Amino acid sequence: MSAPATEPTHDEVAWLLSADAVRQRAHAILAKAERGDLAHFDYRPDRLGDAAALVAAVTRESYPDLNVPYHSRWRHFVVEGEDRWAALESRLDIPDADEIARIRFDLAVTSVLLDAGAGDRWRYRDRDGVELARSEGLAIASFDLFRAGGFASDPIAAYLRADAAALGTLTEETLARGFQAGPDNPLVGLDGRAALLRRLGSALAAAPDLFGRPGRVGNLYDALKAQAVDGTLPASAILTAVLRGLGPIWPGRIARGGVNLGDTWSHSAVGLVPFHKLSQWLSYSLVEPLEGAGIAVTGLDRLTGLPEYRNGGLLVDSGVLVPKDPRLLTDELEVGDEAVVEWRALTVALLDRLAEDVRARLGVPAASFPLAKVLQGGTWTAGRRIARERRPGGGPPIRIRSDGTVF
């Protein structure tokens, strides 16, 4: 008779809510791929060099001086050479660096949470008539809504903020208007995005130690600043705060010990597999506001690569990962399907290996070229480029049915 399943300890739950757990479980699945023991993908290590060569070439083309910024939401606020955030900040009469950082936290968190895939048909037309799609469109749509006071309870006197009162009552209709979404311009997961921001409002009110009273996203900056020692803060502290503070917002996910594990899924080979993709993307996006306020962020490579469709698509399109069932390339899959969990885990692990090869080709050390720069230089751009070469519209090789909260 098998022993009854036991509830995980507090320490085990805390471990699952860490980048170390993401990396360890991902590499455990890669080890099985190397033995040919996975059900859904074959791993072709001989093709990894081709992928690295493409990434290195794209990086040199995009950043000839190799002065690559971090992969973060701030990159998407630059449209046709104009940095929309920098232009807005230059017009603000706010000499307080801490308040600027709070505003940047308000903007980054709401924009990242609204970033999950837009679908192939949705477009956003900005104030200058520029038509944008996908991540760039989502970024500017959320930026414009934030700038208009869409996430603030006082959209006149204190409009550049995201607070519990406004977020907690955000309607799908308000979000649809802000994102120009409708029957002729459908945005995937619109209802899920609106519900996510409403739950964010509740989470702000429920954690005053992180978000203050009344709850405001930007107050998370103050909570992190208080943890800095001699002006430095480990990147893992950012992710820990994000996972703890925003954990309750994720819908219908696996819970252990009464704790919502967020972007964590199950795989028969290793058990629970955490990814925390949006949370890590958000953590990367909070680094620049912290550094802008004079706080040095250390240990960036403790975070992992992002298991999303551009990075994962690069590995499939370059032949590093080969689906064993061709239907994986034709059918629309659910995010919790084991094949998707496998694909995402292999993406995380292989990004570590790819980063080493890319740095060697570029002649840069890991200390000055962390994974956040490899992604930006980088794997995300290379994934987009090869997708455009392979498929009309540049969609990913594997299609995921999005609820607006993961990809």
Image (spheres, rainbow, N blue to C red):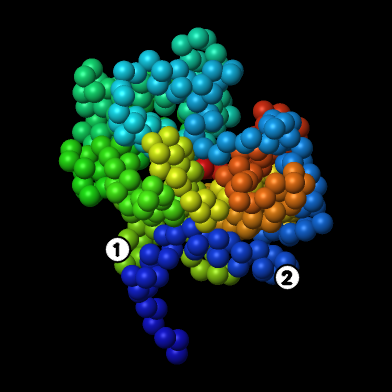
Which residue is denoted by mark 2 in the rendering? 35
The amino acid type of the residue labelled 2 equals Arg
Q: Quadrant of residue 283?
A: top left
Q: Position of residue 53 (x, y in %)?
A: 78, 44
Q: Position of residue 361 (x, y in %)?
A: 77, 46
Front position in the image: 174 or 235:
235
Q: Does 289 sit above or below residue 223?
A: above
Residue visible at 67% across and 59% down in the picture: 40
Front position in the image: 225 or 247:
225
The residue lying furthest to the bottom in this view is 1
Q: Is mark 1 on a helix, strand or loop?
A: loop
Residue visible at 38% across and 64% down in the picture: 14
Answer yes or no: is residue 321 visible: yes
Q: How many marks?
A: 2
The amino acid type of the residue labelled 1 equals Gly
Residue visible at 56% across and 48% down in the picture: 306
Q: Where is residue 57 in the image (x, y as percent from the top left)?
A: 77, 37
Q: Is mark 2 on a helix, strand or loop?
A: loop
Which residue is denoted by mark 1 in the rendering? 258
